[in-house]
Amino acid sequence: MLKFYDREKEIALLSNTEQKSLETAQMTFVVGRRRIGKPTLYFFIEKKE
């Protein structure tokens, strides 16, 4: 896992997404400039059956 500093809220969000991925497909993008704490973007596509 990537190391994030002073990003407790974001780490919690990533952990929550990881837990959700055990039941349904999840995709998370981490974007931002190099060497700066990264904000997160959550993108979900539901599979229609």
Image (cartoon, rainbow, N blue to C red):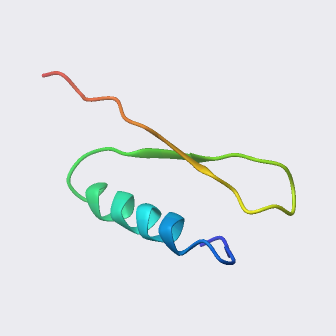
The foreground one among 49 and 18 is 18
Q: Is residue 42 above or below residue 16?
A: above
Residue at x-position 67% and y-position 73%:
4
Residue 19: horizontal and vertical position, in percent?
29, 64
Residue at x-position 32% and y-position 44%:
25
Q: Is residue 49 left or right of residue 47?
A: left
Residue 40: horizontal and vertical position, in percent?
57, 50
User: Which residue extends farthest left?
Assistant: 49
Q: Is residue 8 left or right of residue 15?
A: right
Image quadrant containing the C terminus: top left
User: Which residue extends farthest right?
Assistant: 34
Residue at x-position 86% and y-position 63%:
35
Residue at x-position 49% and y-position 68%:
9
Q: Image quadrant of residue 21?
A: bottom left
Q: How many marks?
A: 0
Residue 45: horizontal and vertical position, in percent?
34, 29
Q: Image quadrant of residue 43?
A: top left
Q: Image quadrant of residue 37?
A: bottom right
Image quadrant containing the N terminus: bottom right
